[in-house]
Image: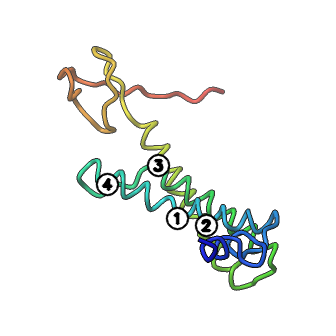
Amino acid sequence: MQSLTDLIWYHGHFLGIEWHFWKVIGWLGNAVFTSRFIVQWYATEKKGQVVVPLSFWWLSLGGSWLLLSYAFFRHDSVFIYANLFNWIPYIRNLIIHRRHVDAHLDCESCGKSCPPRSNFCANCGTQLTVKVQTAVK
């Protein structure tokens, strides 16, 4: 049992790591970034087909920003470059998702949200009408 304690509290540090604020940020970034794979795996298993849930992109964004902030603290050019631009596709995918959600049509008969470009409501069969938004001047 003593050897297990020595492994966990190696040289007086938890897991042998000298902990400080930025070290916690770096490990938190790793945990958040890694958790996105668990979220994606769970969503895929639940649906029975490959799915990339919205939370995957939020976890990717948060994890990469935490890792980038830690990399700047460390002044590690390789680590900084590895995380400097990967947030761009995450934000782009979040924007695409928002536009897709906003493009859904609401059925006036049953209130169900229908996919963009639908002609009829899948729930009640009512013909859908596209509402044209006018610019306010």
Who comes first in sequence, dot 3 or dot 1? 1
Residue 52 spot, x, y in % from top left: 39, 55
Q: Quadrant of residue 76?
A: bottom right
Q: Identify residue for label 1.
A: 34
Q: Quadrant of the N terminus?
A: bottom right
Q: Amino acid at mark 1?
A: Thr
* Neighbour tally class for label 4: few under 14, some 14-19, many 20 plus, Cα within 10 Å: some
Q: Residue furthest top?
A: 109
Tell us which disc is closer to us: 4 or 1.
Answer: 1
The CA span between labels 3 and 4 is 13 Å
Q: Residue type at mark 3?
A: Leu
The mark that comes first in sequence, 4 or 2, is 2
Residue 44, label in figure: 4
Question: Which secondary structure lies at badge 3?
Answer: helix
**In the image, residue 88 lies at what x, y percent?**
59, 64
User: Tags 4 and 2 in contact by the CB under 8 Å rule?
Assistant: no
Q: Nearer the viewer, mark 3 or mark 4?
A: 4
Above or below, comparing residue 71 to residue 88 in the picture: below
**Who's the residue at 74% across and 63% down the image?**
24
User: What residue sits 21% from the left and 20% below the top?
Assistant: 126
Q: Are marks 3 and 4 in contact (CB under 8 Å)?
A: no
Q: Are marks 2 and 1 in contact (CB under 8 Å)?
A: yes
| Residue type of the residue flagged with mark 2 | Asn
Question: From mark 2 to mark 1, how far is it between C-alphas?
Answer: 6 Å
Looking at the picture, how far across and down is residue 64, in whole percent? 63, 65
Image mark for residue 54:
3
On residue 45, which mark appears?
none
The residue lying at 47 percent from left, 51 percent from top is: 96
